[in-house]
Image: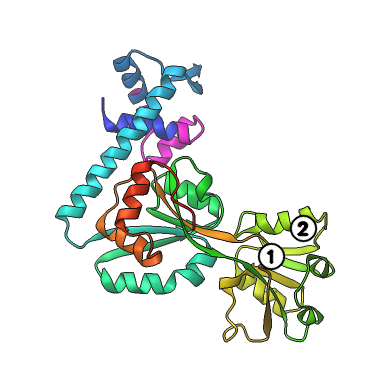
Amino acid sequence: MKLQQLRYIVEIERQGLNVSEAAEALYTSQPGVSKQIRLLEDELGIAIFERSGKRFTAITEPGRVVLDIARRILRESENLKRAAADFSGGESGKLVLAATHTQARYALPTVVRDFVARHPNIKLEMHQGNPLQIADWIAGGEADIGIATESLDQHPQLVSFPVQQWTHCVIAPAGHPVTASSPISLQELARWPLITYDAAFTGRSRINRAFERLEIEPNIVLTALDADVIKTYVGLGLGLGIIAGLAFDAQRDTGLVALDAGHLFDSNTTRLAIRRGSYLRRFDYDFIELFAPHLDRRVVDLTLQGGGQAWQL
C-alpha cells in the first residue's frame, strides 16, 4: 500500500468519480491511476468503487470505510511534514490565508502588517473567495486559515472560532432624504432601490430574514461581492447600500453617509476556521492570536481537543 494510492482514491471521490479529472488534478495519467486503484483493491481484497465497464459509478460500502481511513492517513502524513518543518526549518515556511473581500480589505491589513514584521521569512499567501469556497479550501488543505462570516461553522471538516461580532449599516449619498430618518426602518428602506452583497456573502442571510419576518419585499436592484463596489454604485445614485459596518470609513468614503442598522438586522459573527485534525505550527498560532487576541494557544488547543466549535462571543 502506498500513500500515492490513497491520494488517488481520495481525489477520485473529490472529482465525482471522474478518473480523468482526478488524474489531471494529480498531474499523472488516467491509465496509471486506474492501475494503482486495481492494485490497491487487490491488496485489500475489496472493491472500493463500483464499475460500469471502465467507468466508476459509485463507492462501495467498504470503499467508504477505506476512504475515511485514507483521508485520516493523508492528513496525518501532512501533519508529520508540517511538524518536522516547524521544528527543523527554523523561521521559514508558508501561511496560506483564505478570506472574503470584506475581511481582507478591512479587517486583516494591520494584522498582516504585524505578522510580516514579526515573521519576515514566512511567505504569506492570501486567497479571496466567497464563504463556501473558503470552507472548501480549508477542508481540502488548500489554505491553512479561513476567515469569513457565513458557512465556516456549518462545515463538518472544520473547527471554527468566533472572532468578532458586527452589524450592518445603510449607506446613502449625502443629502439623500433617507438620512433624515432616525432611526431608519425596514419599511423606509423598502421604498428605495437597494444595493447589497451577493447571496453567499457577509451576513446577507440576516438581511433577507429581516425583510421576510415583516413580509416586506425589498427592491434589491444590484448585488456585488464586496463593499467597495456597493459604495461606488451608491455614490452614482443607483440606490441605498447595505454593507458591513466595518467597511465604512467616514474620512475615506467622502460623499456618503452611514446610518446604523444594528436594530434592523441580526448581528453577525466573523469566524476563523482551520481544518479539523490539522497540526498548527508556531506561526499559525501567532497569526490567530494577532487577529483574535482572545484565541491564545491554550484556548485554541482546548477547542481542538474538544473536537467541536469554540465557545460563543
Q: Residue at x 82, y 70 (%)?
A: 188
Check the picture and name the quadrant holding the N terminus.
top left
Would you say the magenta stretch is mainly helix, strand or loop? helix
**Which numbered circle lies on residue 211?**
2
Q: Amino acid at mark 1?
A: Thr
Secondary structure of the residue carrying tag 2 is helix
Q: Quadrant of residue 181?
A: bottom right
Say if mark 1 contacts mark 2, CB within 8 Å: no
* Start-end of magenta stretch: 13-35
Q: Around disc 2, counting alpha carbons within 10 Å, would you say few (fewer than 14), some (14 to 19), or many (20 or more)?
A: some
Point out residue 167 in the picture as x, y percentages from the top left corner. 61, 66
Point out residue 178 in the picture as x, y percentages from the top left corner. 79, 78
Image position of 113 (left or right of 218): left
In front: mark 1 or mark 2? 2
Residue found at the far right of this picture: 191
Identify residue for label 1.
Answer: 196
**Which numbered circle lies on residue 88?**
none
Q: Amino acid at mark 2?
A: Phe
Q: Residue at x 37, y 42 (%)?
A: 306
Q: How is the image coloured?
A: rainbow
Image position of 253 (left or right of 120): right
Q: Tell me if residue 212 is in the magenta stretch.
A: no
Image position of 310 (left or right of 171): left
For the residues labelled 1 and 2, the Cα–Cα distance comes to 14 Å
Q: Around disc 1, counting alpha carbons within 10 Å, would you say few (fewer than 14), some (14 to 19), or many (20 or more)?
A: many
Q: Earlier in the sequence, mark 1 or mark 2?
A: 1
